Amino acid sequence: MLKFGLRQAGIFALGLLGALLLAAAISALPAGRAAYPGAFLQHLLHVAQFDFGASVLTGNPAVAEFSARMAATLELVGSGALMALLIGIPLGIAFGLRRSLRAAAPLIQIVAAAPVFCASLALIFVAVNVLHWHDLHYDGTDLFQVLAARDQSQLVHAFHIFSLPAVTVGAVGVAAVQLVLRGAISDAADEPYRRNLKLMGLSAFEIERIYVAPQVVAHLFAHLGDIVLALFSAAAVAEWMFGWPGAAYLFVKSVALHDWNVVALILLAFTAIKLFADFIGALSAHALAHPESAR
Amino acid sequence: MSMAIDSPHLARAQTLLAAIRTTGLIGLALIAILASLSDVIARAPADRAGYGSELQSPSMLYPFGTDCLGRDMLSETLHGLAATASDAVLAMIVTLIAGGLSGFVLARLPFGTGYVPRGIAGVLGSVPALLLAILAVGILGRDFAPYAAGLAAAPLAFARAFDRARALGESPHAEYARASGIPVSTLLRRDLAYEFRDQFIAVAARALAAVTITLSTMSFLGFSAHRDLGLVIAAERSSYLAAWWTAAFPALALLVLVLFARLAATLEEGERP
């Protein structure tokens, strides 16, 4: 386990180094072609000390611009992740265990072909024309304050604002989680050890609980980075669609206006989160798959 | 005994996969024909305002209706589909060269030096492809949107091809080839030929699905110079809530294009391209 952990830590550290180099390369873009190498080295030194300079648009430190927005993105990704786990896990188990449910495969294939922005437009259409919600655009409402105040009209308003972006991100997460689980369960169903364990007298439930469940959960952890990446990708589109004041929305605006310091910082943060998810996922998967080495 | 049980099951699964792939390829071929003849089939040139009266719902005269500027949505959808398909093919080629081919070749670099580009691809692949493509457009300009989308999809394609090539390099046939003195370049040529034969359609279709989604989303967000389906849908954003057909038909065309590419790649349901 220690050897595996050190190897994964090394991969994580190298990934972070690559992300820092990428951030420095982006920060140095305004220098122009002739002065670029010098500017790159200078920015690399600054970035290594987590000094990302100032936003050229507001003059505020890039870190301040970013941290004000990242909380909103994490809120969105967190709610999407919760939905992905609550719906994706039962769905993945159902699709994996009940092969008759494979009849739904063509429908899922069609839904999966829809780009996220098209799905968001469809959600907005249903919300406005069927549910008669007309307050979908983010207007500065603080979800936690509303929850604390317990005012019913404010709660309904907050629900209208938060639910659609969360559903957009969550739907992508559900697709990712169910796919990983379904694959793991299908693989486990064909494992030869099942038959041998049955011959040894173990009940089907015991085999599932002791042998199959850890294998399936390990598979989910092994793909944690991919699930996190899918959630952040969806959040990028959802933030734009619903005016959500998150980091991905800031990224799009900053690229359009060539605010490279902010762009570099957001990219570094997104990359670091994905690499961290890969790292944690790999360690957890290994610990579950090799419990004897985890002790 | 196990073989006897597995063989019909395996044969059925392979037949189903072949049928799905063929359906996808036929669909893509039909879209290619439609896209190449769009100027002939479409009744109005692209972005032609005032072709009909405003916001006409679908009818015999206007099968896809008209939008708030009186544009014929059937013509707009066809032109948008042609622009999307041609840009997507260009982006797919970029992905195949910068991702699939490079990954396969660089995996065979001596002394494990191929792991350096593999690491770079791993870092770039940790960024959502859409954000990577937007960044590339921010640096290169909107005219380079197809290249940007292709480059953004390349890291994942590179990583997949690299890992496959490494696995092939460690397979028994490679061990025997090395032991019998067959040069590395000959082995690479042989593996590349088999890779092309067995994987090209799946890899290319997967890349097509990925870049089509990225390209149309970029256009929707305003990061493309071409009037493709993403931009057509974005232009109808203010009117589609009252006139569903203005966005529904272009979105449907986009969905069909991605769906056929996914089928041709035989992606699993819910799998990201």
Image (cartoon, rainbow, N blue to C red):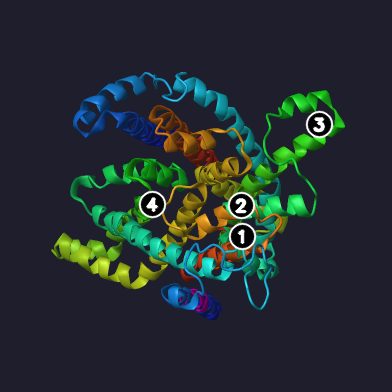
Task: Name the chain under label 2.
Answer: B
The residue singled out by tag 3 in the image is A154
The residues colored magenta run: B19-27
- Dot 2 falls on a residue whose secondary structure is loop
Principal secondary structure, stretch drawn in magenta: helix
- Dot 4 falls on a residue whose secondary structure is helix
Task: Name the chain under label 3.
Answer: A
Task: Name the chain under label 1.
Answer: B
| Residue appearing at x 79%, y 54% in the figure | A130
Q: Is residue B20 magenta?
A: yes
The disc at residue B145 is 4
In whole angstroms, how far apart are the C-alphas of marks 4 and 1? 22 Å
In whole angstroms, how far apart are the C-alphas of marks 1 and 2? 7 Å
In whole angstroms, how far apart are the C-alphas of marks 2 and 4? 21 Å
In this view, the residue in front, B104 or B204, is B204
In whole angstroms, how far apart are the C-alphas of marks 2 and 3? 27 Å
